[in-house]
Amino acid sequence: MTEMNRQVLFRREPRGLPVVDDFEIVETPMPEPGEGQFLIANQYLSLDPYMRMLMGGGWMFRGGAMTPGQVMVGRTLGTVIESRHPDYKPGDTVVGRVGWQTHVVSDGSDLDFKITPRDDVTATAYLGACGSNGATAWVGLKLVGGAKAGETVLVSAAAGSVGSAVGQIAKTMDCRAIGIAGGPEKCRIVTEEFGFDACCDYKRDDLKAQLAAVAGDGIDVYFDNVGAEMLDMVMPMLNRRARVPVCGVLSQYNAEGERYGVKNTRLLFDKSLRLEGFLLADFQDSWDQARADLENLVGEDRLRYRETIAEGLDNAPEAFIGMLQGRNIGKQLVQLA
Ligand SMILES: NC(=O)c1ccc[n+]([C@@H]2O[C@H](COP(=O)([O-])OP(=O)(O)OC[C@H]3O[C@@H](n4cnc5c(N)ncnc54)[C@H](OP(=O)(O)O)[C@@H]3O)[C@@H](O)[C@H]2O)c1
C-alpha cells in the first residue's frame, strides 16, 4: 500500500473554545520533491496558543485568520527522507513552520533551522525550551523586559512552555522569580522542579493576597502571558519604572463578544511603567544567540522543561483544545511517528 500524507485542516471558526469538528483530518498523496526541494517526515508537532488566533476572532496577528481548508499552521520537528537540495540530506533533523501534517515538501524557506545534534539536548527540546518557546522567554525577558540582577520577575502561565523558561532564565540572571499558575500541582512543579522562588495559584479566589504575600516589595518585570483582569490586578504591585513585556493574552483567545479592556492605565503614567507587546518573529537577529544560550542552559541542567505528548496526528485537535484549557504541563507536543 502506498503511504499517504495525513493532514489536519482548519475547517471553520470556533465559537469560544474550539471543538474537534472545527478541524478536519484528510489523506492526500505523498508529495514529491522537485529540483531544489526535499521531503520531510515529521516526527513531532508543536501545539501553541497562537493557533487559536489564526482560527478567527478578528486578530490582526500574522495577517489574520487562516482560510477554511488550509492545513493548520504549526511548527514540527522532522527528518529529511529524500532530497534534491544541496544543503539538506536524508537524515538531517529540521524544525520548520510546515503545518499539522505527517509529510511535507520544503525548499528550506519555511524552516527555522537544521539541528546540530548535541548529546546533552534531546531533539524535542528544539520545539520547546531550545526552540521558539525558549527564545520567546529569552527575548521577552532580556530584550523587551530588560530584567537586571536583583530585580523581581513575575510571570503568568508559569507552568507552561514559555512561562517555565522565563522564571528559570530570570534565576540565571540573579533575579527573584515568581510564577502564577493554575492549581496546586502546577505551582508545586514551578517551585520544586523549575526552581522559582514562589508560585501563586490563580484558580484560588485569593490571588491578590497570595501575590501581596510573596511580592510585597514590588515587581520590576511582569512577563504577561494572560492579559485582562490578571494584568489589572498586578499593575498596582509594579514598582516605579517597571516593565511589562506583553507576550500573549491567553485569557482572551477563546473569549466571545467584546474582549476585556485593561482599566488601570492611569498607573502607566503614575509609575512611569512600560507595557510593550512583542513578537518573537520581530527578533530574528537574536534567534541564534538565544538558541545557543538556551542549549547551554539545558545542557547544564539550569533550564528544565516538561513535555505533555499526545499520540498520533488524529489526536492533535483534542490535545490542542486541552492545552487551551490548561491540561498540559510544559510543552504540548503531538508525536506523529
Ligand atoms: N509573543 C510571541 O512571539 C509568543 C511566542 C510564543 C508564545 N507566546 C505566548 O506565550 C504564552 C504561553 O504560550 P505557551 O506556548 O508557553 O503555552 P503554555 O503556557 O504551555 O500553555 C497554555 C497555558 O495557558 C494557561 N491558560 C489557559 N487559559 C488561561 C487563562 N484564562 N488564564 C490564565 N492562564 C491560562 C494554562 O495553564 P494554567 O493551567 O496555569 O491555566 C495552559 O497550560 C501565550 O500567551 C502565547 O500566546 C507568544
Image (cartoon, rainbow, N blue to C red):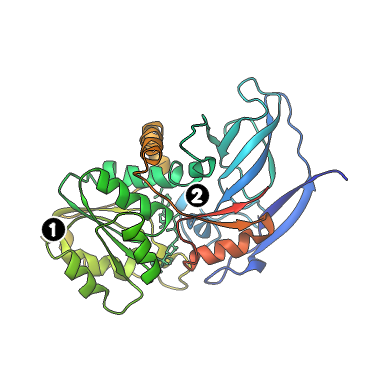
Return the x and y of residue 273 as percentages of the image width and height.
17, 55
Residue farthest to the bottom, as pictured: 205
Mark 2 CB lies closer than 8 A to ligand 1: no
Vertical comparison of 128 with 20: above or below: above
Mark nearer the viewer, 1 or 2: 1
Residue 170 falls left or right of residue 161: left
Return the x and y of residue 28 as percentages of the image width and height.
78, 48
Residue 97 falls left or right of residue 303: right
Residue 229 in view in this figure: yes
Residue 76 falls left or right of residue 130: right
Identified at 65% across, 43% down, the residue is: 42
Identified at 43% across, 47% down, the residue is: 133
Return the x and y of residue 212 as percentages of the image width and height.
17, 70
Residue under label 2, please give it: 63
Residue farthest to the top, as pictured: 86
Badge 2 marks a residue whose secondary structure is helix
Residue 110 in view in this figure: no
How many C-alpha atoms fall within 10 Å of the one at disc 2: few (<14), some, or many (≥20)?
A: few
Residue under label 1, please give it: 239
Residue 92 occupies which quadrant of the picture? top right
- Nearer the observer, 160 or 83: 160
Q: Amino acid at mark 1?
A: Asn
For the image shown, how many numbered marks are present on the structure? 2
How many C-alpha atoms fall within 10 Å of the one at disc 1: few (<14), some, or many (≥20)?
A: some
- Nearer the observer, 115 or 58: 115
Q: Amino acid at mark 2?
A: Gly
Badge 1 marks a residue whose secondary structure is strand
Quadrant where the image shows the N terminus? top right
Residue 153 occupies which quadrant of the picture? bottom left
Vertical comparison of 99 with 286: above or below: below
Of callouts 1 and 2, the N-terminal one:
2
- Nearer the observer, 250 or 171: 171
